[in-house]
Image (spheres, rainbow, N blue to C red):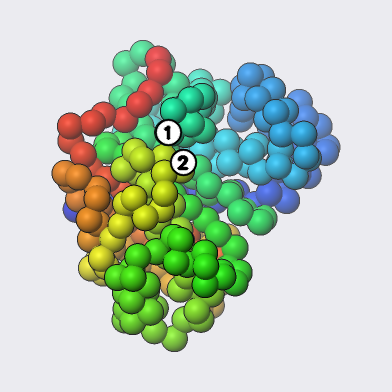
């Protein structure tokens, strides 16, 4: 799909149930056709089984998104020809890093998961950040910690969210803040009030529903340009979605002075 400004991104969602079933059937079966032995081994750092399934689902969604994005650019790679590691230290600890064969142009990647779904987004330029949340109540104290007064005012009155429940509004706002700290390089260890926004301009609906997310009645999916006060140079565009009990935000920061991080 294309965001405002013409940036192409690829979004893939994977239900955790399908990964759980594949793992229980055979850890060396279908999953090993997508993930490398090292990637499967890294998932073992999660000692709770459901967390391991979430990790695997996120990596599988990422591989599918990367394969699709690279093939669209004329690089017909198989999933196991692509590696995914992560930053091990610093403010962006845990951020995925794409490993590509020599001569293949860089991609940026963000992975998120919540409840029963994992989602990955890939961009060929700039940086991406995504966050998925199961819609649930948020306490007033948490809202004050995450949002400025201006952000709370915008989320309460913006036209796009008229008719949506307060829980939908605040969870979508939370997704925006998480995606924003990811795509601007601040990392999830940063305070959510370190990077702020004052609103957004709608840029129209997406062309097709996102499977497992916006493919049900009553779903919302809009392309936006976010008005961010701390993103630095370059536009922040993205996708906001509500559907199937989830809130989702994917943001792209086109900072031409900063290339995506990858390893060959």
Cα–Cα gap, marks 1 and 2: 6 Å
Do the numbered discs 1 and 2 sit on residues whose CB atoms are within 8 Å?
yes
Q: Mark 1 packing: few (<14 Cα in 10 Å), some, or many (20+)?
A: some
Can residue 199 be seen here? The reply is yes
Q: In the rendered image, which residue does mark 1 sit on?
A: 91
Residue under the image location 52 percent in, 72 percent down: 140
For label 1, the SS is loop
Q: In the rendered image, which residue does mark 2 sit on?
A: 189
Q: Is residue 41 above or below residue 177?
A: above
Quadrant hosting residue 31: top right
Q: Mark on residue 141?
A: none
Query: Looking at the image, which residue sits at the far bottom?
Result: 163
Residues 139 and 26: in front is 139
Residues 76 and 16: in front is 16
Residue under the image location 36 percent in, 13 percent down: 102
Q: Mark 2 packing: few (<14 Cα in 10 Å), some, or many (20+)?
A: few
Dot placed on the residue nearer the N-terminal end, 1 or 2: 1
Quadrant hosting residue 240: bottom left
Give coordinates of residue 180: x percent, y percent.
Answer: 36, 51
Residue 260 lies left or right of residue 20; in this view the side is left
Residue under the image location 40 percent in, 18 percent down: 263
Give coordinates of residue 196: x percent, y percent.
Answer: 30, 57
């Amino acid at each position: 799909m294309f965001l405002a400004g013409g940036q192409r991104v690829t979004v893939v969602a994977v239900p955790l149930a399908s990964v759980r079933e594949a793992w229980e059937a055979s850890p060396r079966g279908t999953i090993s056709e997508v993930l490398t032995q090292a990637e499967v081994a890294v998932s073992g750092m999660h000692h709770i089984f459901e967390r391991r399934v979430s990790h695997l689902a996120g990596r599988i969604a990422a591989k599918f998104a990367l394969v699709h994005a690279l093939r669209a650019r004329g690089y017909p790679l198989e999933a196991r020809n692509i590696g995914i590691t992560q930053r091990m230290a610093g403010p962006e600890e845990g951020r995925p890093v794409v490993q590509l064969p020599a001569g293949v142009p860089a991609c940026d990647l963000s992975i998120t998961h919540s409840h029963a779904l994992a989602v990955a987004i890939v961009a060929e330029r700039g940086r991406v950040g995504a966050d998925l949340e199961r819609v649930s109540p948020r306490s007033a104290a948490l809202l004050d910690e995450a949002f400025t007064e201006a952000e709370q005012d915008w989320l309460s009155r913006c036209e796009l969210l008229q008719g949506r429940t307060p829980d939908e509004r605040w969870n979508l706002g939370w997704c925006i803040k998480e995606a924003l700290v990811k795509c601007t390089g601040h990392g999830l260890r940063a305070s959510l009030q370190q990077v702020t926004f004052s609103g957004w301009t709608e840029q129209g609906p997406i062309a097709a529903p996102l499977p497992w997310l916006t493919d049900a009645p009553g779903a919302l999916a809009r392309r936006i340009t976010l008005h961010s006060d701390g993103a630095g140079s370059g536009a922040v565009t993205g996708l906001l979605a509500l559907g199937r009990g989830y809130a989702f935000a994917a943001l792209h920061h086109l900072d031409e002075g900063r290339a995506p991080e990858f390893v060959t």
